[in-house]
Image (tube, rainbow, N blue to C red):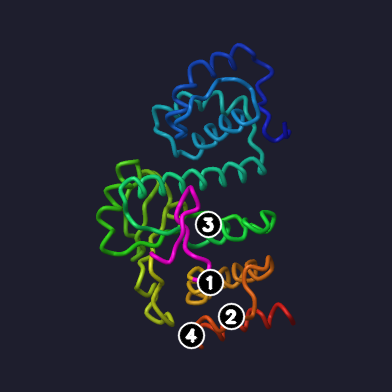
Amino acid sequence: MPEFLRIRLQQNISVRRRFFRDLCGQFRATVGWTEQVACDKTEDRMFRFRLFVYNARESVVPTSEKAVVMNLANSSITISGWERVAMAIERIRQRLHRTAAALDAAQVPYAVIGGNAVAEWVGRVDEGAVRFTRDVDILLDRCDLPPAIAAMEAVGFVYQSVHGVDMFLDGPDSRPGEAVHIVFAGEKVKADDLQVNPSVQASEHTGTFVVLSLEALVEMKLISFRRKDQTHLEDMISVGLIDRTWIERYQPNLGHRLAEIFDSLEN
């Protein structure tokens, strides 16, 4: 077991046993796993337990459950920087899967976009080239926003529009930077965007969630063309997902942007 996943509770065996016995049910319900979780010390379950403690510290579990763990968590468990990163990634994975499950169950068309979509495509070729992203971005048709709100709020998300950005907060105490952000298909994000966003239909199901097609994802990155979009394009080029022949697939203004990326990499 990696050292950073070990629980440092060896000093007090009785506390550990009582803690696992009392919190096993709360742990399953709060963190969101539906399968039966045995309270043993396997690597996977230890990671999930530490994620539970991390969530408690980050105030993303209900106050009633947070109060149960905080004394033990604060006094007996040290969470390193590496663990915090791993747990933050796991929380994003959970948020993505809960979002997909809610929208799929409600039959609301959507597609995962942004950094998670890039990670899905890049990870199919080279998992070591995948970059970490903090939030979840989805593409929706505006007409599907009401049923999407109903589906997401039924599983604990909270709809808000903050400074013109529509999003689902992961609970009432969640931060906008860790929300599910909504982008609307067939519309421009900014008035000066070169063209509108692609259709939700330009997508495919991964088996876990619906992801925007590679061609449409590259198009969105070329439309936004912020520094992080350019970095994502560079990542997709570096693993061989796209090459110079793709320049001709897009309108000249977008194709020119893609040519700039290739030129900068070659220089």
The tag on residue 116 is: 3
Give the amino acid at mark 2: Leu
Residue neighbourhood size for the residue with mark 2, other residues' Cα within 10 Å, grouped as few (<14), some (14–19), many (≥20) = many
125 left or right, relative to 177: right
Determine the CA span between mark 1 and mark 3: 13 Å
- Give the magenta-colored segment's residue range: 201-215
Percent x, y for residue 134?
53, 54
Residue neighbourhood size for the residue with mark 4, other residues' Cα within 10 Å, grouped as few (<14), some (14–19), many (≥20) = few
Residue occupying the far top of the picture: 14
Determine the CA span between mark 3 and mark 2: 21 Å
Tell me which corner region of the image, top left, top right, bottom left or bottom right, holds residue 145.
bottom left
Determine the CA span between mark 1 and mark 2: 9 Å
213 magenta-colored: yes
SS at mark 3 in the image: helix
Mark 4, mark 3: which one is toward the viewer? 4
Mark 1 vs mark 4: which is more N-terminal? 1
81 magenta-colored: no
Give the amino acid at mark 3: Asn
Residue at the disc numbered 4: 251
- Quarter of the image with the N terminus is top right
Contact (Cβ within 8 Å) of mark 4 with mark 3: no
Residue 94, relative to residue 48: is it above or below? Answer: below
Mark 4 vs mark 2: which is more N-terminal? 4
Tell me which corner region of the image, top left, top right, bottom left or bottom right, holds residue 9.
top right
